[in-house]
Image (cartoon, helix red, strand yellow):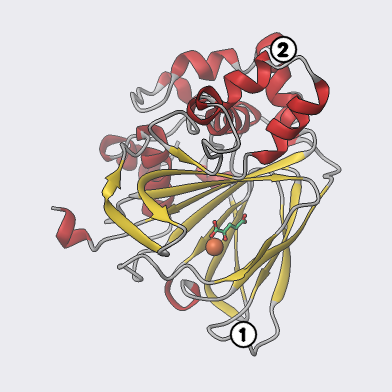
Amino acid sequence: MNITELHMREYLNIPIGLRPLHMWRCYMLKNHPGLLVIRNPFTFTGQRYWIARSLRDYPLAPNIVNLDAKHFSSNTVSDWWRELHKCTEKSIAHRLKTSMRWTTLGYHYNWDTKAYDEAMHTLFPIDLFSLSQYFAYVLGFPNYIPQAGIINYYPIGTCLSGHTDHSELNHEAPLFSYSFGQTAIFLIGQNTQEEQPSALFLRSGDVLTMSRESRLCYHAVPRVMKTQKEPWNDFLTIPQWKSKEFFNNSMNFELYDQVTDTCFWMPFNRYIADSRININVRQVFSSDDCL
Ligand SMILES: O=C(O)CCC(=O)C(=O)O
Ligand SMILES: [Fe+2]
């Protein structure tokens, strides 16, 4: 461990499940200043942890999901993952699995008004808060406050059309995007729809940051496709960093241990074998308004 890491450990709640900083590969795109990609800084246990959190825990009420009471039982709306695994009828299970498309956390984005509703606020998960603050710190945004999250669920073959994320009142703060599972083709353009976008693959574990000039650029996910590698099952080749010895009270240690158990992991493995999960984190308000 170098002095910088040692220094940071004293101030930050460092998330477990990440490879050491000196192993990270971080890229900037020539034509897209402010767009940063860190290629999979997660260990296999780290990947499994965030996949399990996104499926089992984050969709739990009072967080908001796209499943509505008109088409689904109240049990499904409040605990989708449990209901999916209670389901024995194949076609119903398939419908349940593929119907889940998003969960919102913290300040909830209202898809009808396209605004954040200050009255609609639930606790932002402390582990995701800590993870995002760590990435922000490392990338030079020490005052970043994660306030809103969208978990996007993409069964293979689904897509997300071109858009900008401009509803946050704070456009200075970066947006963090964590990808897990199957591979996405990600298109990133400029501030208007006129310019030709660039395409990149987002694979499991990749962290994308839209900051500064790229914060308000158009982007889309035209395709989610089968990955050739499954880093969440790659326990032989990815070196594990024994970071658990460092105290981090923001993560669920029980889950972190459970995900390495084959039996426990099986339902998560089945889901992620043909789906992608994207965790999107934003700061909505200016840091001064929050203090
Ligand atoms: O799935 C992705 O990589 C992008 C998601 C996204 O753009 C959004 O949630 O606004
Ligand atoms: Fe977006």
Mark 2 residue type: Thr
> From mark 2 to mark 1, how far is it between C-alphas?
46 Å
Q: Position of residue 268 (x, y in %)?
A: 68, 24
Image quarter in which the N terminus is found: top left
Asked which secondary structure carries label 1, the reply is loop
Q: Is residue 201 above or below residue 128?
A: below
Q: Is residue 256 above or below residue 234?
A: above
Camera-nearest label, 2 or 1: 1
Per the image, the residue denoted by label 1 is 193
Residue 40, quarter of picture:
top right
Residue 71, quarter of picture:
top right
Who's the residue at 55% across and 38% down the image? 70
For the image, the number of numbered tags is 2
Who's the residue at 59% across and 32% down the image? 72
Q: Are marks 2 and 1 in contact (CB under 8 Å)?
A: no
| 193 relative to 138 in the view: left or right | right
Q: Is residue 145 above or below residue 10?
A: below
Per the image, the residue denoted by label 2 is 262
Who's the residue at 47% across and 26% down the image? 243
Who's the residue at 74% across and 25% down the image? 93
Q: Residues within 10 Å of mark 2 (few under 14, many from 20)?
A: few
Residue 237 bears which disc, if any? none
| 61 relative to 169 in the view: left or right | right
Between 94 and 1, the one lying in front of the other is 94
Q: Position of residue 156 (x, y in %)?
A: 79, 46
Residue extending furthest left? 291
Q: Position of residue 130 (x, y in %)?
A: 37, 39
Q: Position of residue 284 (x, y in %)?
A: 32, 59
First in sequence, mark 2 or 1: give its number. Answer: 1
